[in-house]
Image (tube, rainbow, N blue to C red):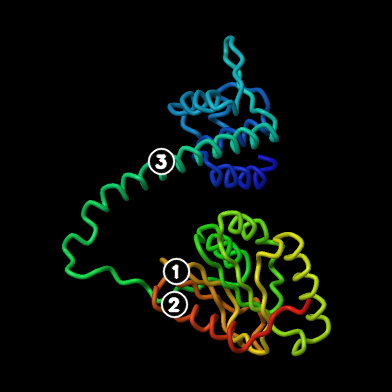
Amino acid sequence: MEYQNDIYQIISLLTSIGLNEYQASAISYLLVLGETKATTLSQSSGIPTARIYDILKDLVKKGLVTKKHGKPQMYRSRPPEEIISILMAIQRNNLRKNIALLESKAKDFTDIAYRIYLKGSKGAPTVPLFRAVSVGDSSLEETRKLYDVAKEEILIFSKALEYFPLVSENLKAALERGVSIKIILVSPEVMELKDREKQKIIVESIKRLLGKSVMFRFSDEVPIRGSIVDPNREGRAIFLVEDPGIPFFLRELAITSHYSFVKGLAIMFNLIWEYKSKQLEK
């Protein structure tokens, strides 16, 4: 048959988005034949006669094929754009059902699993020292999460806090909850002019959007970049170390909720704050 290669490609595409091979084959040949009888479609597509009526019944039920009553009954495929629209709607609905099922199973799992969690263990669970995430959207989302759970204190190490516009709402919400925010930035004197200008714009933006309650200091030495949250409670932190020569997009950040590690980072922050930094000039 003419267009056979196109038919094979359509069958492959349709099977990849949810139809079985017979269903995909029936639609593909109906696209070529137009309105036709089930027996003619069976002969053209190679679908067994014993199966063709059930296949067409399923396709009519899905809305992919229309049936004209009479003797004989005639079948026609929907236009291509309607077929793909219907299949996408079916897959979206299946996805919603699968997500709902996963959510219900997740709740069942945690409810049951916590009844036996560590019951046979003599010691407390160990906390991993840290886990790594790549710089970019993942690290930004993790930073937002930290700010959103902060209850007492947020400590930020940064060069110029270039990502502030992307987390400003999270920091504002933290301030409204009564969270203290301290920021150590690199001293402008040791930065290149273009970086100094960027930092100045960001600092002015922070003061404008968050007010005077945010505290700043500047230091010639800022050995890490990142944020420390609630070190005197169940602290968390996300950070990366200075790594000259390595492109920023190739670096990874470490995330930790290890109490001692977070406490150590906070001690370093406070020492730099007290002894190796200066206040923002008026």
In this figure, which residue is indicated by the disc labeled 2? Answer: 263
In this figure, which residue is indicated by the disc labeled 1? Answer: 235
Q: Is mark 1 on a helix, strand or loop?
A: loop
Q: Position of residue 214 (x, y in %)?
A: 66, 67
> Is 137 situated left or right of 56 in this image?
right
Question: Gap in Å between the C-alphas at discs 1 and 3?
Answer: 33 Å
Residue positioned 54% across, 44% down in the render: 15
- Disc 3 and disc 2 in contact, CB within 8 angstroms: no
Residue 124 vs 47, above or below: the answer is below
Q: How crowded is mark 2: few (under 14 residues within 10 Å), some or many (20 or more)?
A: many
Give amino acid for label 2.
Lys
- Quadrant into which the N terminus falls: top right
Q: Position of residue 252 (x, y in %)?
A: 56, 77
Earlier residue among tags 1 and 3: 3
> Is 189 situated left or right of 159 in this image?
right
Q: Which of marks 1 and 3 is in front?
A: 1
Earlier residue among tags 3 and 2: 3
Question: Gap in Å between the C-alphas at discs 3 and 2?
Answer: 40 Å
In this figure, which residue is indicated by the disc labeled 3? Answer: 101
Question: Gap in Å between the C-alphas at discs 1 and 2?
Answer: 7 Å
Give amino acid for label 1.
Gly
Quadrant assignment, res 103? top left
Q: Which of 13 and 282 is in front in this view?
A: 282
Quadrant assignment, res 177? bottom right
